[in-house]
């Protein structure tokens, strides 16, 4: 009954001979995978490659859930999942492999429960902890292809470096708010230090993004928000790429003596950008495929003369946390104590009527402000303030035009208090206002409210709707 | 998302944090402009943009990657952004 005909016998031998994987499909496999196997280019050959392969999915969240569903459904033989978090209610709008009934469960266990329901055939391997410099190489080494579904820059650089050294293709995607990006890196894998060739060796993450952005500018989904379908789309696309790499053996460097046409490996790497516009009725989204370059000759990880090693990574070099500025971003204090006031002190002084007429500038995004704010606060989002500051500097307009107009209008020495979400942007705004001269040479006090609206919730009003 | 830029201009597309920083998704700037002057031109419009976003972003010109980082005089100095071109600023995104 099976299409185990002799027609593709030779090709099967080539494709699967190395690992001795030419075999009949079981009835269960035949039935389960029939709809994808009849797709041109897939066939039994591609299916067996999937069954005999091992894919590691790092991150069981908004990208990892949809990616894992399709990878499991497609019948990949071994699926490893890495995540140290537990399921939280605020995850469920996008992390579709979890469930309300599994809140508080380890994400890897919750997702595996879901995946087993979809397809009991694969072997699922839970790694219920976060990937770090000590454990990364040992885990990655056990798999054929890595899917990066993580949520922070330090881990992204670590994964890329380890994939370069262990020669694993890496399907990397990321998504925040209304946009996402996806790129296949290191595919086919080329030895570290080899740049030239036909085609030029494929890039790693560092070839594309040499330096991480300053801490604080790279916000997480928890802070900036994320639309479920946007991150879902990127996760599904990751599964598509990972399945394609395995099924078509794109991760195996072209062998000149093989019957597989070398053109299959000649594609120039592309970065897929997806953007979604909540306000646009027509053309609700756009996809852009951007042509990327090959390996960067001077790349720290994969370029010529790179000194990166697995032993070094295990021993803490490079230091990924430091590289991404994470060590310094917590409790960052930019201003001296006299320029700052605690949320509780502000609230108490306001309640006692001790504060002179003043401006309370709330620099959170409009959406955050819309859930609640301190009485009398005026919302000017951080980004808008910076743009206004640049325009004033450029055009030489009066500095205090940056302040919101008040009625009645306040004297030019009325104090300004600045509050944001967690207390970092507000300090930068205080500095910026001073730099512009809004403080009238010291006549006007400009103060930061320490810890932002989070502190307000913690110290003043526990019912405040803080997101 | 982006209509054609007016005559004598090119479009700059701002993705992810570049869009948040500028509060825009797209903007038309006067062309021609040497590629090596792009970051300077953007910095003068958005103070602090370079350090916060641009220096870490990937840049494409007409959907193809251009190297802003190695910035050796021979390559980036000869690329001129032309009338009608499309430049994209793509900061790394790390969430998922």
Image (tube, coloured by chain):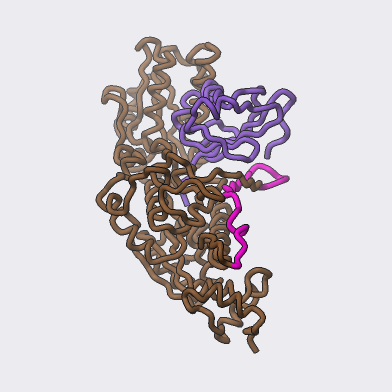
Chain colours: A brown, B purple
The mark total stands at 0
Is residue A103 in view from this perspective? no
Numbered range of the magenta stretch: A259-285
Q: Residue at x 51, y 76 (%)?
A: A17
Q: Pick the residue in front: A441 or B57.
A: B57
> Residue A343 at what x, y percent from top left?
33, 34
Give above or below for A89 relative to A367: below
Q: Pick the residue in front: B3 or A78.
A: A78
Give above or below for B96 relative to A15: above
Relative side of A193 to A291, left or right: left
Q: Residue at x 41, y 61 (%)?
A: A87
> Residue A218 at what x, y percent from top left?
44, 40
Q: The N terminus of chain B appears in which quarter of the rendering?
A: top right
Which image quadrant for residue A60? bottom left
Relative side of A289 to A350, left or right: right
> Residue A371 at what x, y percent from top left?
49, 42
Is residue A442 in view from this perspective? yes
């Amino acid at each position: 009954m099976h299409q185990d005909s002799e027609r593709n016998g030779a090709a099967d031998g080539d494709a699967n001979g190395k690992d001795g994987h030419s075999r009949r499909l079981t009835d269960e496999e035949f039935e389960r995978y029939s709809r994808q196997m009849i797709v041109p280019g897939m066939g039994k050959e591609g299916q067996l490659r999937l069954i005999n392969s091992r894919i590691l999915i790092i991150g069981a969240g908004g990208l990892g859930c949809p990616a894992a569903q399709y990878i499991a459904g497609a019948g990949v033989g071994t699926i490893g999942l890495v995540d140290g978090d537990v399921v939280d209610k605020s995850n469920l709008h996008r992390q579709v492999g979890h469930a309300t009934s599994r809140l508080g469960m380890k994400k890897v266990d919750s997702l595996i429960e879901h995946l087993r329901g979809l397809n009991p055939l694969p072997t699922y391997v839970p790694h219920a902890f976060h990937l770090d410099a000590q454990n990364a190489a040992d885990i990655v080494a056990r798999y054929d292809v890595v899917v990066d579904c993580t949520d922070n820059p330090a881990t992204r650089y670590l994964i890329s470096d380890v994939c370069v050294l262990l020669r694993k293709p890496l399907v990397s995607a990321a998504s925040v708010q209304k946009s996402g990006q996806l790129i296949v890196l290191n595919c086919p894998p080329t030895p570290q230090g080899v740049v030239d060739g036909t085609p030029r060796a494929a890039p790693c993450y560092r070839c594309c993004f040499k330096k991480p952005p300053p801490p604080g500018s790279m916000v997480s989904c928890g802070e900036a928000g994320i639309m479920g379908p946007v991150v879902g789309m990127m996760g599904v696309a990751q599964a598509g790429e990972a399945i394609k790499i395995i099924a078509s053996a794109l991760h195996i460097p072209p062998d000149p003596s093989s019957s597989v046409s070398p053109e299959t490996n000649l594609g120039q790497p592309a970065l897929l950008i997806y953007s979604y516009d909540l306000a646009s009725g027509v053309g609700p989204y756009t996809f852009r495929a951007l042509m990327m370059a090959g390996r960067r000759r001077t790349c720290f990880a994969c370029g010529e003369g790179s000194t990166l090693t697995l032993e070094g990574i295990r021993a803490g070099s490079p230091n990924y946390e430091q590289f991404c500025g994470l060590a310094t971003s917590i409790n960052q204090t930019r201003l001296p104590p006299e320029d700052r006031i605690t949320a509780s002190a502000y609230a108490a002084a306001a309640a006692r009527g001790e504060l002179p007429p003043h401006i309370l500038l709330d620099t959170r995004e409009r959406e955050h402000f819309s859930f609640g704010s301190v009485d009398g606060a005026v919302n000017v989002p951080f980004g808008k303030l910076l743009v206004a500051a640049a325009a004033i500097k450029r055009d030489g307009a009066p500095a205090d035009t940056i302040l919101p107009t008040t009625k009645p209008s306040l004297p030019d020495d009325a104090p300004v208090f600045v509050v944001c979400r967690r207390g970092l942007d507000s300090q930068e705004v205080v500095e910026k206002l001073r730099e512009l001269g809004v403080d009238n040479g010291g006549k006007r006090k400009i103060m930061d409210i320490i810890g932002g609206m989070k502190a307000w919730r913690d110290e003043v009003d526990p019912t405040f709707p803080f997101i | 998302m982006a209509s054609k830029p007016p005559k004598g201009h090119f479009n700059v597309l701002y993705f992810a944090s570049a869009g948040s920083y500028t509060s825009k998704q797209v903007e038309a700037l006067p062309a021609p402009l040497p590629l090596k002057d792009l970051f300077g031109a953007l910095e003068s419009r958005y103070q602090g943009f370079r350090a916060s976003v641009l220096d870490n972003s990937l840049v494409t010109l007409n959907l193809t990657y251009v190297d802003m980082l190695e910035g050796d005089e021979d390559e980036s100095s000869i690329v001129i952004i032309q009338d009608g071109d499309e430049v994209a600023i793509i900061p790394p995104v790390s969430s998922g």
